[in-house]
Image (cartoon, rainbow, N blue to C red):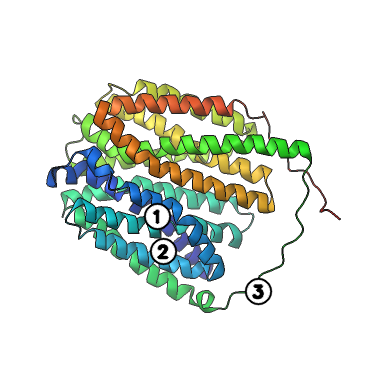
Amino acid sequence: MRERLHFLLLNLGHFLDHLFTLIFATVAALALHREWGLGYADLLKYATPGFFAFGVFALPAGWLADKWSREGMMSVFFIGIGLASIATASARTPLEIGIGLFVVGVFAAIYHPVGLAIVVEKWKNTGMRIAVNGVFGNLGVASAALITGYFIDHGGWRIAFIVPGVVSILIGIMYTALMWREIAAPRPPVRVKAAAKVLPADFKALLLRISMIVFLTTAVSSVVFQSTTFALPKVFAERLGGIAMSATAVGQLAFLVFALASIGQLIVGHMLDRVGPRTVFIAAAVLQVVFFAVMPGLTDWAALACAMAFMLAAFGQIPINDYMVGRLAEGEWRARIYGVRYVVSFTALAATLPLIAFVYESWGFDALFRLLALSAAVILGAVSMLPQRLPEPPAVAAPA
């Protein structure tokens, strides 16, 4: 029972992590541009530092968790991000809300290097647990527009920050009580590192080649992911006027698209071992090129259907890079590549917001979708250079 509750709370943490980072996307699109008289592009500038914090502070969060306590850091995550969200609700100026979002980003940075590490290490050889945890994160993305849109219509945008903040604090108190024994326990002594394995030269070259493809596609995929998840509420507000007349309706349709798109990860996960990552990745990239290119000019039901298609492909490709790293790298190689991958991903997420603001202000969303089609074409070109099948890591002995 305790283990099940622990796993549930970790999953709720992943849900809240993505929820908190996207509340402002809907608030800016549907409320603040009217209340504060600022353009959508101007408002996005104040969210950018928070996403940089989301990436930059992941490394010190992981280091502190290893030095002190991972379970303790998860308690800090729940309570800290809840307090930061509540404080953000009191913002009276764009600068104040920017500071609040930055602090939210600092605490949000804790989850991936700490919460996911607990899931991977505590329940080994349980791919389904990792998949379930990923779905909770996707549902956090999906629910941000739904929950925020509802609160904008029923109480105002400030409530959209306050209610999730209170919920997170309550979960944090529960988590602390449940895991207090582990939090209070002294850290075990650091184990001496084993000698590093020597990899054959040809496998090192292959690993380097695939790592470069992973880093490139990670950066470009993050641009696609951030552009679609952050901008979709505003896209729907502008283009679904015939079928969405309120903030709640826009949020419901965005939730529907994101939630159904999460199925893409299950489809991809099922196909990776059957046909290999190259074929699956190419299929996901082709779908994105086609539907991003088709999206400009579409409205109402046609725009909704097209958005469903490109989000299905965009969400579906998320686990492919992690799958390739997990298959090819072992030990310190895996940890290093995962670490660099997260830095690349989160940095690209932060850099995307100024891009969205600039493109939207200069040319509108049609230009953004054409840019995303080009980005997907870059991904397609990169993954076409992957081997058809990934080789297994060679069994090698440590040096004498």
Which dot, 3 or 1, sits closer to the camera? 3
Quadrant into which the C terminus falls: bottom right
Secondary structure under badge 3? Answer: loop
Q: Position of residue 16 (x, y in %)?
A: 38, 56
Can residue 396 be seen in the rendering of this structure?
yes
Secondary structure under badge 1? Answer: helix
Q: CA distance from mark 1 to mark 2?
A: 9 Å
Q: Is residue 114 above or below residue 276?
A: below
Name the residue: 59% across, 62% down.
122
Name the residue: 27% across, 52% down.
98
Q: Name the residue beneath numbered marker 1.
A: 17
Q: Name the residue beneath numbered marker 2.
A: 77
Image side of residue 170 versus residue 55, left or right: left
Query: Marks 3 and 2: CB-CB under 8 Å?
Result: no
Within 10 angstroms of label 3, few (less than 14), some, or many (20 or more) residues? Answer: few
Q: CA distance from mark 3 to mark 1?
A: 31 Å
Within 10 angstroms of label 1, few (less than 14), some, or many (20 or more) residues? Answer: many
Query: Marks 1 and 2: CB-CB under 8 Å?
Result: yes
Mark 3: amino acid: Pro
Among the two numbered marks 3 and 2 on one chain, the one whose residue lies closer to the N terminus: 2
Quadrant in the rendering for residue 226? top left
Tell me, for residue 295, which label it has, or none.
Answer: none
Quadrant in the rendering for residue 34? top left
Among the two numbered marks 1 and 2 on one chain, the one whose residue lies closer to the N terminus: 1
Q: CA distance from mark 3 to mark 2?
A: 25 Å
Q: Is residue 160 above or below residue 368?
A: below
Q: Is residue 65 above or below residue 288?
A: below
Image side of residue 242 versus residue 336, left or right: left
Name the residue: 22% across, 58% down.
89
Tell me, for residue 189, which label it has, or none.
Answer: 3
